[in-house]
Image (cartoon, helix red, strand yellow):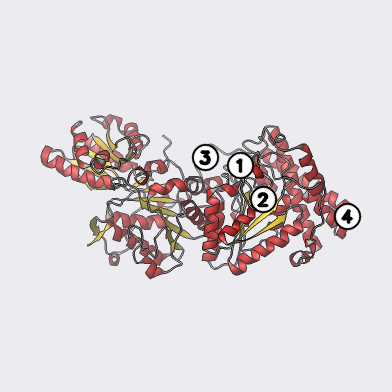
Amino acid sequence: MSFPAAPSHRLDFASSPINQALTAEQKVELLRTMIRIRRFEQASLKYYNAGRIGGFLHLYIGQESVAVGTISLCGENDHNITAYRCHGHALASGMNMNECMAELFGKYTGSAKGKGGSMHFFAPDKNFWGGHGIVGGQTPLGLGLAYGLKYKGLQGAALCYMGDGAVNQGAFHESLNLAALFELPVVYIIENNGYSMGTSQKRSSAYRGCLAQRAEAYDMEWDLIDGSDIYEVRAKTHIAMERARKESRPTVLEITTYRYYGHSVADANAKKYRSPEEIENYKNNYDPINTFRNRLLQEGVITQEQADAINKEAADEAAAAVEFADASPAPSIESIMDDVYWEVDNKTIAGQTGRHFFND
Amino acid sequence: MRTLTYREALREGMDEELARDENVVLMGEEVAQYNGAYKVTEGLWKKWGDKRIVDTPISEAGFIGMGIGASMLGVRPVMELMFWSFHSVAFDQLVSNAACVRYMSGGLIHCPIVVRGPANGGTNVGATHSHIPEGMFAAFPGLKVVAPATPADVKGLIKASIRDNDPVFFMENTLLYGTTGPVPDPADGDHVVPLGVADLKREGSDLSLIAHGRSVIHCLEAAETLQRDHGISCDVLDLRTIRPLDQEAILKTVRKTHRVVLVDESKAFGGVSAMVATLIQDHCFDDLDAPIKRVTSLDAPAIYSKYVENDQLPNPKRIVEKVLTIA
């Protein structure tokens, strides 16, 4: 993945209507949500390295503008679903740091009572449907959310995120065909951070132009977005969401972005398949949080002191979430058997007829 | 009582559920305009139209995953696999998403879907189209597995499955679609057969035959032969549902006859009968007068040749021979 050493001249999407409509408070909120995600993940990294968090930890650091920019456009009937790099989408959808951190710690107070872990955050009440561990496995589910919207006659969009590695999964291509064939209100968002685990885009994908251009084969609209600019993310995603809501037609968006850490924290080769210079260049010149903070300083929307305060509040919130998670109880052994069957959990007649479990 | 084919009874069950709940949608390959590859859905598209009866492309992972996603927003998809053998191209959706999404979300999400279609050998189509996966799917907690043998049961069980709020994998049999049997008249009330309840299809005293799906029909024929030619009287217990499993009915028949032969079209290794045998030895060890015996499909991929195909599967002759080894 190569980005020029300095951002070239580009269109100013601050003037697009969807960004013009933002109040100063809403702009600050976008910045605050991005910073909260980063501070949350920095805290989680610290406790992962200390052995307090198990499994995999796929950090979103560097990509925050994608989840925050796109989900900020969501209304009552818009839904979103993503893959395993899901912390940013969860927090942007309105999940709180405590339930997310406790889930990472494997505690009963976690969002999934310690049953999901890092890759499986869910908040259906906030229209956030996960958090899915298998690359590309969520792409038909996102289609199904769009199907549900259309079936029920609701005007909404289903945002379905994936990494650039997922574009080569069969389930994704089946989904694209179905999306176009059934005219479903889904927006596929390829978060292109350049690497499917340790394999660069050039070594993993055959394509003309860009990955999103594959949509043309299915007669679908597509667009390419610079993910370092949250204004651009919002402006172009808004168009795709309106196409979904108003015309019930799908779109593929590709948002270029970058992850500062490895595929997961356990990625042993994180610093081998790309150069330190490449990482530093993105951090220094394209970081979505710095870019937007500088923009808001320029616009006079915030002061440096306010920006620093947001940073501190987010760090404090993450530290408090760690304390909450740490102090929370572990799940009981008995709780292993909960949440397998709806009918059993709800003690219905069906749930009490026949043997459901075979433990002894 | 009316006589219907298995196919007609199944269709009638789905038709009634389409009428009962506007969120029920039938989808799959050729289910609408073609009237169903096995004519199970014949006439339903004409009656219910494009919204309720949906033809999909040949994309099992795509449309089953789509149905799972739609179920999260309250749609209740009933998805046809033209053959259950095609499960393998949708496996991730079936086991990582349908089976696990409730658990991984700590109970926040549930998945009220039915995936249905024929799951059997014996139709001269070779190994790829003859997989018998009920034992395999029953091994995934979160899933329910149903395998009806008669027209009345297929109707009552499809209705219960559609109403169930968990994912139900419903396994039919192409060789049963044309078989006939009595089915209660809708005028006499809603015919729903609950999941998890086995049915004693024949009463006897000397030995228990326990089976599901088409093997039940074979057991009934074998029981007739055993009575006539050998004076052996058999209970024939139809499990009907694999998971949840009617353990009490299994133990009850074994405690009555003290001898049991399990008949199961799946393979012996990890098949349904392996689980049933474990339960019997665990709970009825002292009741048994003979070892538990099994008749399963011979342990090779399904053979094509019509000359020996039926010998690979459980059949009345193999059942009789096995019974005579312990009775």
Name the residue beneath numbered marker 4. A303
Question: Could you tell me residue A297's position as x and y percent?
Answer: 87, 56
Question: How crowded is the residue under tag 2: few (<14 C-alpha within 10 Å), some, or many (20+)?
Answer: many
Give me the chain letter of mark 4. Answer: A
Mark in the foreground, 4 or 3: 4
Element at label 2: strand
Q: Amino acid at mark 2?
A: Glu
Residue depicted at x 28% and y 57%: B6
* Contact between labelled residues 2 and 4, with CB atoms less than 8 Å apart: no
Count of numbered circles in the view: 4
Name the residue beneath numbered marker 1. A117
Lower sequence index among marks 3 and 2: 2
Name the residue beneath numbered marker 3. A336
Distance Cα–Cα, label 1 vs label 2: 22 Å
Lower sequence index among marks 1 and 4: 1
Residue depicted at x 37% and y 70%: B47
Name the residue beneath numbered marker 2. A191
Residues at marks 4 and 3 on the same chain: yes
Distance Cα–Cα, label 3 vs label 2: 34 Å
Element at label 3: helix
Question: How crowded is the residue under tag 3: few (<14 C-alpha within 10 Å), some, or many (20+)?
Answer: few
Mark in the foreground, 4 or 2: 2
Element at label 1: loop
